[in-house]
Amino acid sequence: MTTGVFFHEFFARYSWPIIGNRYERFPELLAKLEREVPGIRVIRPEPVLEGLLAKVHTPDYLERVKRAWYYEGARLTVGGFVKACEMVWKGELDNAVVFMVAAGHHAHRDYAWGGTYLSCIGPALVRLKELGLRRLAYLDTDAHHADGAREVLMGNRDVLHICFCHQDVVEDGGTKICVDVGWSTSDEAYMDKVRAVFPTVRAFGPEMIVHFLGHDTHKNDYGSLGLSRDFFIRLVEEVKALADELCDGKYVIVHGGGANRHVAEYIWPRIIRLLAGQGKA
Ligand SMILES: [Zn+2]
Ligand SMILES: [Zn+2]
């Protein structure tokens, strides 16, 4: 088993929009994990090529975002995400975790908000299709609706996008789904909602699963739905089992929202160990 962990020390140096300095201790945490667990490879991302961004974002928007102080971090994040998807798809890694600043699911083609200023899934999908991938399942368990990702993916029925948020929606021929998880829930009730979509994922037949995992849903984070920190590890355990069943374990997780560094420091080493085949939730 090889689990790729995409992280750049640059991420730990600043307080980023919305998520703050949640990665301050990650350089040492990840170095320790890499030393202790065979099969974990920490990979330092390169910035995404601007030509690839231009296939997703409009020229006007790219001109504006390039002037923002967080652009370099966003570009490294998307670069890491695209590389992680490529390597898992090609079998160079079994699975991967991608750490994220200033990029993610609120980035539309021509505007963005909520601390995420470049699309991750758009550029990755362009590359994956070039590499022959046909069917992708993209799960989003952040607290907020994935408006930007939804816009970017709309019309692309090769991608099953399931977003757990605060509305029940089925659109784009049944390939774009939102599941209302309520404003206050429990670990068990949320997990039941996730399990309830597994038959839909099975029927779709993805060749890879990508998971935008926010812990802003944690009871002490800014999008609280009342979830506990151990919930996130069990969630990954179940989605990983689904990826093992459906697509040779091809599973890429990207760190979504969440500013509580104690939650981040607790869950990610455990999730990475789990992906590397060490330990249960
Ligand atoms: Zn969120
Ligand atoms: Zn949604």
Image: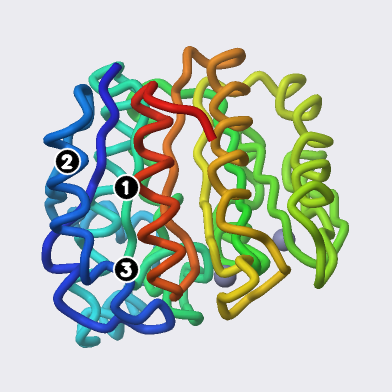
Q: Amino acid at mark 3?
A: Val
Q: Which image quadrant is residue 35 in?
A: top left
Q: Is residue 64 above or below residue 203?
A: below
Q: Earlier in the sequence, mark 1 or mark 3?
A: 1
Q: Is residue 28 above or below residue 257?
A: above
* Residue found 23% across the figure and 76% down from its top: 71
Q: Which residue is mark 1?
A: 81
| Disc 2 from disc 3: Cα separation | 17 Å
Q: Amino acid at mark 2?
A: Val
User: In the shown orientation, is residue 226 left or right of residue 223?
Assistant: right
Quarter of the image that includes the C terminus = top right
* Residue found 46% across the figure and 75% down from its top: 110
Q: Which residue is mark 3?
A: 101
- Residue 125 showing in the rendered view: no
Q: Which residue is mark 2?
A: 42
Judging from the image, what secondary structure is the residue with disc 3 in?
Answer: loop
Badge 2: how crowded within 10 Å, few (<14), some, or many (20+)?
many
